[in-house]
C-alpha cells in the first residue's frame, strides 16, 4: 500500500461527474475573461510546458524579468483576475481546516506532453494554511516528497475529480507532475488536464 508523506492527503473522487462538469463550466467562464497564457521561468525566460491563468484577488505569475510572484492583475490583459468560483470556496472550507478563504486559485492546463518539475510552493507569506488542489480531465502521475529535495518521493495517479491537500508538515513538500495519461478522461473534449490550486497568500489581517 502506498504511504503518503506526512501532511499529504489524497481524496480520490472528491467531486463526482456532475460536480466536475459544473466546476469545469465555472473555469471555462473564468478563462474567457482571463485567458491562459504561457508562463516563463525566472532569469532563463524558458517557457513552461503548462499554460496558466488565475482566479481570486491574487494570482501567481512568473516571467523572465520579475520571477515568481503574486499580483492582482492578469499579465497579458492587465485586468483583475475573475473571482474564485463559489464551489471551490466551499471545497476549501470542507477540506482545508483553515478558517479564512484562499486568495489565489492557480489554473494550470496540461496538454498531453506537459509536465511540471519537482518544486515547493513557497511564494506565500502564510504557511499555516494548506495548499488545496483539484484535478479535472486526464489523469497524471503526481510525485510528492518532503521538505528537502533529496527526501524520498512517492508517485501516484491523480484522476479527474480528485482533491489533494499539502498541509502541516507537508505544506512545503516538494511535488511535481511527471506525465499526463492521454485519453483517460472524457471530461475535456480535446483532452488534457486542468489542475486548480487554492492558496492563502497573506496572513489574515496583513496589510
Ligand atoms: C502545481 O504544483 O502547481 C500543480 C500541481 C498539479 O498539477 O497537480
Ligand atoms: Mn506546486
Image (cartoon, rainbow, N blue to C red):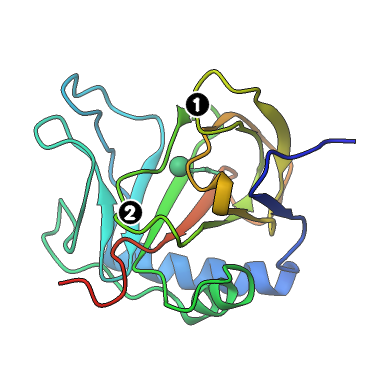
The residue at 56%/80% (across/down) is 90
Quadrant assignment for the C terminus? bottom left
Callout 2: SS: strand
Q: Give percent across and percent down for residue 19.
A: 67, 73
Cβ at disc 2 under 8 Å from ligand 1: no
Label 2 vs 1, first from the N-terminus = 2
Image position, residue 179 (x, y; %): 60, 28
Kindly give the residue lying farthest to the right in the view shown.
1
Quote the CA–CA distance across marks 2 and 1: 28 Å
| Residue under the image location 70 percent in, 67 percent down | 15
The total number of labels drawn is: 2
Judged left or right of residue 104, residue 167 is right
Quarter of the rendering containing residue 167: bottom right
Task: Identify the image quadrant of the N terminus.
Answer: top right
Q: Is residue 100 above or below residue 75?
A: below
Q: Quadrant of the rendered structure where residue 24 is?
A: bottom right
Q: Could you tell whether 80 is left or right of 88 in the image?
A: left
Quadrant assignment, res 143: top right
Residue wearing tag 2:
53
Q: Residue at x 69, y 56 (%)?
A: 162
The disc placed on residue 148 is 1
Q: 58 or 99: nearer the eye?
A: 99
User: Helix, strand, or loop for circle 1?
Assistant: loop
Closer to the camera, 195 or 71?
71
Amino acid at each position: 500500500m502506498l504511504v503518503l508523506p506526512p501532511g499529504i492527503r489524497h481524496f480520490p473522487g472528491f467531486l463526482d461527474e456532475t460536480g466536475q462538469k459544473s466546476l469545469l463550466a465555472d473555469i471555462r467562464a473564468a478563462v474567457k475573461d482571463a485567458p491562459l497564457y504561457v508562463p516563463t521561468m525566472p532569469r532563463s525566460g524558458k517557457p513552461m510546458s503548462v499554460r496558466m491563468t488565475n482566479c481570486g484577488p491574487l494570482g501567481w505569475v512568473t516571467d523572465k524579468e520579475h520571477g515568481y510572484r503574486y499580483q492582482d492583475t492578469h499579465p497579458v490583459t492587465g485586468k483583475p483576475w475573475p473571482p474564485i468560483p463559489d464551489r471551490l470556496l466551499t471545497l476549501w472550507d470542507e477540506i482545508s481546516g483553515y478558517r479564512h478563504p484562499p486568495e489565489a486559485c492557480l489554473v494550470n492546463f496540461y496538454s498531453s506532453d506537459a509536465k511540471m518539475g519537482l518544486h515547493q510552493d513557497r511564494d506565500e507569506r502564510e504557511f499555516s494554511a494548506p495548499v488545496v488542489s483539484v484535478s479535472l480531465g486526464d489523469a497524471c502521475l503526481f510525485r510528492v516528497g518532503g521538505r528537502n529535495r533529496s527526501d524520498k518521493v512517492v508517485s501516484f495517479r491523480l484522476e479527474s475529480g480528485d482533491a489533494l491537500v499539502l498541509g502541516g508538515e507537508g505544506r512545503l513538500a516538494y511535488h511535481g507532475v511527471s506525465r499526463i495519461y492521454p485519453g483517460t478522461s472524457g471530461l475535456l473534449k480535446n483532452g488534457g488536464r486542468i489542475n486548480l490550486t487554492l492558496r492563502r497568500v497573506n496572513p489574515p489581517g496583513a496589510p
